[in-house]
Every structure is written in structure tokens, then in C-alpha cells.
Amino acid sequence: MTKTPAFIDTHAHLGDPRFEESLDQVLDRARLAGVVQIVAIGTTATDSARLVELAAMHRGIFVAVGVHPNHASAAGPNDWPAVAHLASRPGVVAIGETGLDRYWHDTPFPVQQEWLDRHLELAHSLDLPVVIHCRDAIQDCLEQFGRLSRQIRGVMHAFSGTWDDAQAFLEMGLHISFAGMITFTNKSLDPLRDAAARVPLDRLLVETDSPYLTPHPFRGKPNEPARVATTAERLAQIRDIPLERLAQHCTDNARLLFRLPDSRLLAAPSHPELP
């Protein structure tokens, strides 16, 4: 029997309301698909706090705490101190999701930039990686990162740019993570697939961004961590390497970046006694 490759979903919004009634089943399906660990991503102070509690109850789930750029304008005066406090809690392995977004207009752009700086400084002070959201704002991200006098330990999540963009972020120290977009059949995404083919194997990550960015052929349905295997399979095809090799590199990279213990693997809720 062929062994199922091991995957780490490095970006899943497990706090999304769509998972509230079905999380146990979602985690069961993830484990059966070969997902061994999940990084659950906070988008608000409240969401981050809930995810920290979730990680305490479910082995193999780890957390990034932060305020998403599209939620920053709604944050209260106590939200940032709350995030900073959560950053030192057990199970927290990253800061974010933070970044810049010119697609939506929920938060004034200067406010997004201020919150990005906050996240970058907190991550640096705690020696944690930062999870970067960058939608229609690649040049803005490059300019803001370029003002730093140091490399950035972190990941460009759900990367959507070109190889030239990826090279610039790689030079700044970042990892590049690919989500379901590389599986879409749109020819307009060929430059993204070209980037996916060329990112060095030791800087490559894979994710779902669930419940968003559902990969083909499941588009139209909510995404979930089990489908990281679908995206990884397409990524292996793009790079013309065996899936097992791709999965091993991405898993090793995720464990190194987020300092994930290889002994704490996902235990599906219906089988908590399993390793």
C-alpha cells in the first residue's frame, strides 16, 4: 500500500463561522488526507484568542495571532495589547495575518500600513515569523519591507504575483506559499504558475486559506484543510517532481519556519488516542 504523503496546511481560518458546526469532521477529513499539522490564522483579537483556546484542545493545531488589514479599522483600543499578550501563549507560532490590501477598501491604506508595521515589530521582537497578506499591493509591500534594515522571517501567504515579484520577496528573506489559485484553469494565472515552478524548494510552502480559494475541481464549495493535498498535487505537477518529494520539502520548510514540533501531530477528534 502506498503511504499517504504528509502535508502541513500553513494557512487555514479555522475560526470561520462556516467551520463552527463541523470542525470535528473537517479535522477528521484532514487527517485522512495526510494533513499532520495546521497553522490556524487569526484575523482579529477575538478570533486569535479563540484559536489559542482551540489549539489547546486539539493536538497538531498551531496559531498565528493578529489583525487582518481589512479588519484593522474596526479594531478597538484594547485589541492590539490583547494580540501582543496572546503572542506569548502556548501554541502560538507566528504573528498575523497582517499586510496590505488595495482590493477591498474596508481600512484606509495608511492605517493598514501602520498595523503592518506593528505586526512586523512584534514578530521581530519575539523572533516569530510573520504571515503576510498582500492583495493588489505587491509594490506597496515591497516598498514598506524595503524600509526595514533587516531580513524578514515569514511567509507571503496565497502568493499571487509573478516570478519577478517572488524573487524580490525571497531576497527579503520570506518564504512563498501557494494556495488553490495555481489549480484554477484561467490562462491569466500562467505567470503565477511560472513563479510556482521556480521558487526554490527550500522556501516553498503550501496552504488552503480555507474556507477560501477552494482548488479546482472543488470550486464553488467551502475550502478545508484536507484539500491542501489537491493544491500540493498540482504544485508537484507544475514543478515536474513526485508528490512525495514536494510534500516532504513543504513539510520540512513549514516545520523549520514555524518551529513546529514533529511529535505533535494532528489527532482527529473522533480518534484522539491515535498518534
Image (spheres, rainbow, N blue to C red):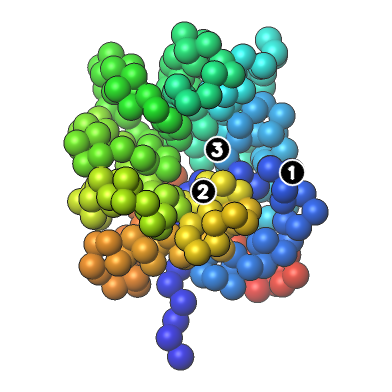
The image quarter containing residue 246 is bottom left
Q: Secondary structure at mark 2?
A: loop
- Disc number for residue 17: 1
Q: Identify which amino acid the numbered label 3 is placed on.
A: Ala
Q: Identify which amino acid the numbered label 2 is placed on.
A: Leu
Q: Measured from the top left, where is residue 128 in percent x and y?
A: 44, 34
Residue at the front extreme of this rendering: 187
Sequence-wise first label, 1 or 3: 1
Q: Secondary structure at mark 1?
A: helix
Q: Measured from the top left, where is residue 123 in percent x and y?
A: 45, 27
CA distance for labels 1 and 3:
18 Å
Q: Measured from the top left, where is residue 110 in percent x and y?
A: 47, 8
Given this view, does label 1 or label 2 mark the residue nearer the observer?
A: 2
Q: Is the residue marked by circle 2 packed among few (<14), some (14-19), or many (20+) residues within 10 Å? A: many
Q: Measured from the top left, where is residue 197 in percent x and y?
A: 23, 55
Location of residue 48 with respect to 200 vertically, above or below: above
Q: Identify which amino acid the numbered label 1 is placed on.
A: Pro
- Residue 91 in view in this figure: no
Residue at the bottom extreme of this rendering: 1
Given this view, does label 1 or label 3 mark the residue nearer the observer?
A: 1
* Circle 3 residue: 64
Sequence-wise first label, 1 or 2: 1
